[in-house]
Image: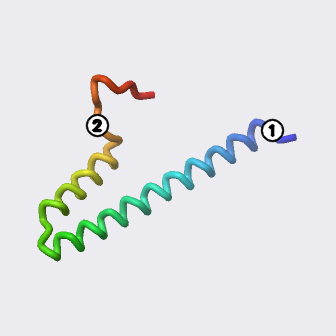
Amino acid sequence: MSSPENGRLEADQDNTSIQAGWEAALREFQHQATHLESRGAVRAAVTLYDAIRIARAGGLNCEHQMRI
């Protein structure tokens, strides 16, 4: 049987893994945006850079969407 403390440690490890995954994805998006920019697709790159900024800021606040 596991103790509540073990459950907390597992949850912390899960959260750390999720955070690491998000960071890796955002770094890859940044990398791809750099490629787009170097190929002259500046509008697409700017859109991707903006999406990265929004994701890092925690998303957009919409009046019809409840946040937990």
- Residue 60 image label: 2
Q: Nearer the viewer, residue 15 or 37?
A: 37
Q: Is residue 8 left or right of residue 32?
A: right
Task: Name the kind of residue labelled 1 in the image.
Answer: Ser
Q: Position of residue 64 (x, y in %)?
A: 31, 23
Left or right of 15, for residue 56: left
Compared with residue 60, is residue 23 higher up or lower down, i.e. above or below?
Answer: below
In the image, residue 67 lies at what x, y percent? 40, 28
Pointer 2 and pointer 1: residues touching (CB < 8 Å)?
no
Asked if 22 appears above or below 57 in the picture, the reply is below
| Residue 34: x %, y % from top left | 23, 70
Q: Which residue is at a point 75% across and 44% down the rendered structure image?
A: 6
Please, which colouring scheme is shown? rainbow
Considering every residue shown, the one lying at the far right of the view is: 1
Q: Of helix, strand and loop, which one carries label 1?
A: loop
Quadrant of the rendered structure where residue 35 is? bottom left
Q: Residue at x 38, y 25 (%)?
A: 66
Q: CA distance from mark 2 to mark 1?
A: 38 Å
